[in-house]
Image (cartoon, rainbow, N blue to C red):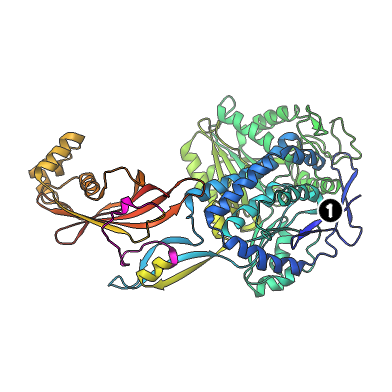
Amino acid sequence: MAPLRSYVAGNWYEPTDAGTPLHDAVTGAEVARISSAGVDLAGALDYGRRVGGPALRELTFHQRAALLKALGSHLREHREELYAVSTQTGATLFDSKFDIDGGFGVLLGYASKAKRELPNDTVYVDGAVEPLGRGGTFLGQHICTPLHGVSVQINAFNFPVWGPLEKFAPAFLAGVPSLVKPASLTAYLTAKLVELIVDSGILPEGSLQFVCGGVGDLFDHLTEQDLVGFTGSASTAARLRAHPVVVRNAVRFNAEADSLNMSVLGPDATPGTAEFDLYVKQLVTEMTVKAGQKCTAIRRAFVPAELVDDVVAAVSERLAKVTVGNPANKDVRMGALAGLEQREEVRRSLKSLLEAGKLAFGDPEHVELVDADPERGAFISPILIRCDDPDSAAPHEVEAFGPVSTVLPYASADQVIGLAARGKGSLAGSIVTADADFARQVVTGTAPWHGRLLVLDSTDAAESTGHGSPLPALVHGGPGRAGGGEEMAGMRGVLHYMQRTAVQGSPAVLGKVTGQWIAGAERRTDDVHPFRKSLAELRVGDAVVAGPRTVTLADIDHFAEFTGDTFYAHTDEEAATANPLFGGIVAHGYLVVSLAAGLFVEPRPGPVLANYGLENLRFLTPVYPGDELTVTLTAKQITPRENADYGEVRWDADVTKQDGSSVAKYDVLTLVAKS
């Protein structure tokens, strides 16, 4: 049987020894061998730093996002090849889509968010400018730049496609190369994924490397610029986190580990309600998708004590309809565990759980199969346990990583909050209820022990992605037992791979560093109105000063009548005078903004294609009849779009009156043609 190859330093490598056999989870047949013998792991890290890192850092966030999008689209065209291999891991077609299409979704989701939320630049500006002196000449600004190391990504066996991609996507966007190390049990599917990626030629060389087998001396060569992302058991995470090099160099270590996730049925969700049915359906789904081999699966099902019998009966009825067997058979609902060793591990865990409770459904030693051999395949029945003593230790300490869940009673919201905390940290939890007050109490009470909480009811059920579906925009991780780390989480996930640095300096210097105009820096005004300049001609700091325009009482009256905004401060002299903030009739804030637009606009057709909004609008000083308005509009940030003939320009607008005081400040957003 051919050994799996590693891809390092731009080449594919076969191991120098025979390797360890890997087996089909359904048939038991050998499908590959795995070993990292002969791979220069120190050289792989060095190659990533020397070749992959510089190539990525030359690209802007938007350029990296475009490559992620192209890669996601390319892989979608080859999904059938991955589905075929995925069957050997014991996955049904639905399981495979959850893993494979979910992974593609992470790539595409991050690409989309990056276009909306990141600049078309290589530096990320984090937060507002911090004034450090009274005169405005000394400022502070936080920026984020990519670390100059490699993201070492050690993945679990249960999601051989989604797992690597959810770590790779934010690292790639940040400008940091990845070295992917899959779990051995299902490494042959990750190997196929990497083969498709490499053959596509889409990614810059060195941005993705792949080590199939053990980590060897890899950790001995980590530097302060490298990162480690780990998914697996808490014990392994603790051992790797304590590696002397990781400790000495303060290597960023993100772990996603064990998790005794919970789901709470609200007291209002009695049989016959939509929420009761949603709870039962969700629990069965979480038990059977990927044969329960999900780090987010529901292990503890908390149910009001008076509803335990109803829930156990309803869940058992649905589980009885679940067909188990060969995932290639279209009639099969649940496939195999990833391997025979994994099945034995689940059975060992079940012994502790069954000492605390009793079997409500299933048989750990026997299951009726469709089109499969129970002796060769790693099959097990869905197992529902009923534990009438919620204070029993085992359900809160033992995770059977398979199609196993324990139903536990509770008597009050306070009790279930305390029981949830006994899991010592979880990735995901859910509360199924139509009672918003109960939901708030449980959410706020359990949030410190959870990375993500879903509140499910009849109003959001149709669109809900479910208890156990991580999303690129949201945190995937959890405190305590769950590892203490976070993955993805939108731009938060990207920033994990970057260094946040506080830069202190003058407005001009900070503007040059950030690529943005900062108040106090030089403005440039000339005979050409900035709205007459294309994106290629416009420069940050280009400005126009327009005005003055005298505001009259007739203007205020007309605006009130025309818009219908007859708030007393604009229309009733006596009431306006009594107002402690104004002391008389004042102009509408939106009248001020409208008059400012009339001052700075250049009306003829030209490079400015559209105004698509205002941001950060603040009204600072009242405007009275007779005040004279002047507006200063400055090009603050220029963001070309990669695949369009226009880009975005953010303008700083400062409206002042005759004494120089600012009456309104805001950002104007426009679309401007590139040429």
Nearest the eye: 414 or 139: 139
x then y, percent, for residue 272:
58, 24
- Asked if residue 531 lies in the magenta stretch, the reply is yes
Q: Which residue is mark 1?
A: 4
| x 69%, y 38%: residue | 97
Q: Secondary structure at mark 1?
A: loop
| x 78%, y 30%: residue | 332
| x 44%, y 71%: residue | 503
x then y, percent, for residue 251:
64, 69
Nearest the eye: 388 or 76: 76
Instruction: Identify the residue at the far left of this view.
Output: 574
Q: Relative to residue 131, is residue 330 drawn left or right? A: right
Is residue 154 shown to the viewer in this render?
A: yes
In this view, 259 is above or below 504: above
Q: Which residues are magenta?
A: 513-535
Is residue 298 shown to the viewer in this render?
A: no
Instruction: Identify the residue at the far bottom of this view.
Output: 248
Q: Relative to residue 527, is residue 7 drawn left or right? A: right
Nearest the eye: 551 or 231: 551
In this view, 61 is above or below 334: below
